[in-house]
């Protein structure tokens, strides 16, 4: 690769926010799986074109290059036409593809020929992915995590939000995963990110944190829905996290669950399909009862029984096994999930974190 108009990956990542635009020229399918933060997708080959050229390359590399070059040139022309308002004087984009090869090289050449100081990312997305994995393996050890523990429905997520509102550093893993972490945890009309996209979002969050200040986080299993926490973060939370146990009365927990899972009121069939997966754990008869209660709109009864018969049994013992420091954790009580009660508990947690 010519060293003209290129930028090494380490330098590019250190000044990622300084580019006018970050342009990902990979196919829409590659872009959807993951991409650099804030990138725009200007594919020089769409999903089908990439398949066609790739298939042809295995049969006749020269013919594939000829066909591919013609397609790439036409697609670049379309992007230049469509994005002329964006390309003002002194516009300086970063361009990348999978490995920093021909696709991004072609786009970068065109932009520089126009007169823009465009830069091509050496190593492309593959180099960025390597940086993400490296950071996720090293960064967690730098932080003092304060881990909020408590039974399902005890207001841990609301406490994180209150702590963030008070100026504390918060790492909201469920927000990044777009999942609440339980069998019912999928968010309505919000698909989870791919594992790579979750890793990238977590990377963005970690590099913004100050190691000299505590970071508040909710206790989580290794898996949150369909994505996994990096091993280094998972171990740091469990072996070194300072735990706080959150207590809320059952009445308040039921009310909070009714609020957080209100979307099931209009979709009892979705709720019933999800808890159908609990038959092997809780028995067909008990699950059928919960499903009947849901169809009948008796949601307080459903959540109360789920808490008592599914979520709570053995929960504290299991959590203690995974978080050894939980045995010495202070207990902070909430009357309910109201803003007033949550704010008061957040003050107590901040006082604990200050030591």
Image (cartoon, rainbow, N blue to C red):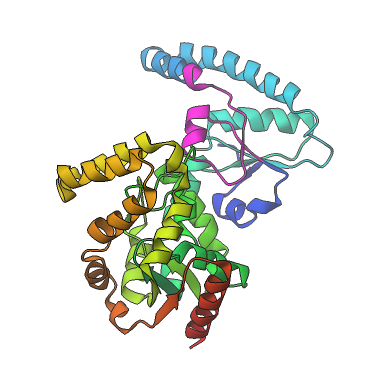
> Is 140 placed above or below 193 here?
below
Left or right: residue 83 compared with residue 248: right
Q: Position of residue 237 (x, y in %)?
A: 37, 69
Residue at the (41%, 13%) spot, across then down: 56
Looking at the picture, tell me which residue is in the foreground, 14 or 348: 348
Quarter of the image that includes the N terminus: top right
Q: Position of residue 60 (x, y in %)?
A: 40, 12
Left or right: residue 161 compared with residue 251: right
In the figure, residue 338 lies in which quadrant? bottom right
Residue at the (58%, 24%) spot, across then down: 44
Left or right: residue 131 compared with residue 222: right
Verify whether residue 39 appears in magenta.
Answer: yes
Q: Position of residue 206 (x, y in %)?
A: 51, 62
Q: Write the start and end of the magenta stretch as one range.
A: 22-49
Left or right: residue 153 compared with residue 18: left
> Is 87 placed above or below 73 here?
below
The single residue placed furthest to the bottom in the displayed view is: 355
Residue at the (66%, 22%) spot, across then down: 76
The single residue placed furthest to the right in the displayed view is: 89
> Is 347 placed above or below 192 here?
below
Looking at the picture, tell me which residue is in the foreground, 135 or 157: 157
Specify whether residue 118 is in view: yes
Residue at the (42%, 49%) spot, across then down: 179
Q: Position of residue 313 (x, y in %)?
A: 22, 63
* Count of picture labels: 0
Looking at the picture, tell me which residue is in the foreground, 148 or 42: 148
Looking at the picture, tell me which residue is in the foreground, 182 or 248: 248
> Is 219 placed above or below 146 here?
above
Verify whether residue 81 appears in magenta.
Answer: no
In the figure, residue 110 lies in which quadrant? top right
Specify whether residue 193 is in view: no
């Amino acid at each position: 690769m010519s060293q003209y108009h290129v930028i090494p990956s380490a330098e590019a990542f250190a000044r990622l926010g300084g580019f006018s635009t970050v342009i990902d020229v990979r196919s829409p399918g590659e872009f959807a799986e993951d991409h650099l933060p804030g990138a725009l997708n200007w594919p020089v080959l769409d999903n089908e074109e990439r398949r066609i050229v790739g298939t042809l390359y295995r049969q006749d590399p020269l013919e594939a290059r000829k066909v591919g070059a013609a397609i790439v040139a036409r697609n670049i022309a379309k992007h230049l036409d469509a994005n002329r308002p964006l390309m003002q004087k002194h516009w300086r984009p970063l361009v990348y593809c999978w490995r920093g090869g021909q696709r991004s090289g072609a786009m970068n050449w065109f932009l520089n020929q126009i007169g823009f100081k465009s830069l091509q990312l050496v190593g492309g997305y593959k180099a960025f992915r390597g940086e993400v994995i490296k950071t996720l393996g090293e960064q967690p050890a730098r932080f003092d995590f304060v881990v909020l523990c408590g039974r399902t429905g005890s207001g841990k997520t609301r406490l994180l939000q209150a702590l963030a509102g008070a100026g504390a550093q918060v790492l909201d893993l469920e927000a990044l995963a777009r999942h609440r972490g339980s069998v019912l945890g999928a968010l309505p009309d919000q698909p989870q990110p791919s594992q790579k996209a979750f890793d990238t979002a977590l990377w963005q969050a970690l590099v913004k944190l100050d190691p000299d200040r505590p970071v508040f986080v909710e206790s989580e299993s290794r898996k949150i829905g369909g994505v996994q926490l990096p091993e280094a973060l998972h171990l740091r939370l469990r072996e070194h996290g300072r735990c706080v146990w959150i207590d809320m009365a059952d009445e308040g927990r039921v009310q909070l669950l009714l609020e957080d899972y209100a979307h099931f009121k209009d979709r009892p069939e979705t709720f019933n399909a999800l808890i159908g997966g609990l038959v092997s754990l809780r028995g067909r008869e008990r699950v059928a009862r919960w499903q009947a209660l849901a169809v009948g709109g008796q949601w307080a009864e459903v959540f109360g029984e789920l808490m008592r018969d599914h979520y709570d049994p053995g929960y504290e013992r299991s959590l203690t096994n995974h978080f050894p420091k939980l045995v010495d954790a202070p207990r902070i009580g909430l009357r309910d999930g109201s803003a007033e009660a949550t704010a008061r508990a957040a003050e107590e947690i901040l006082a604990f974190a200050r030591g």
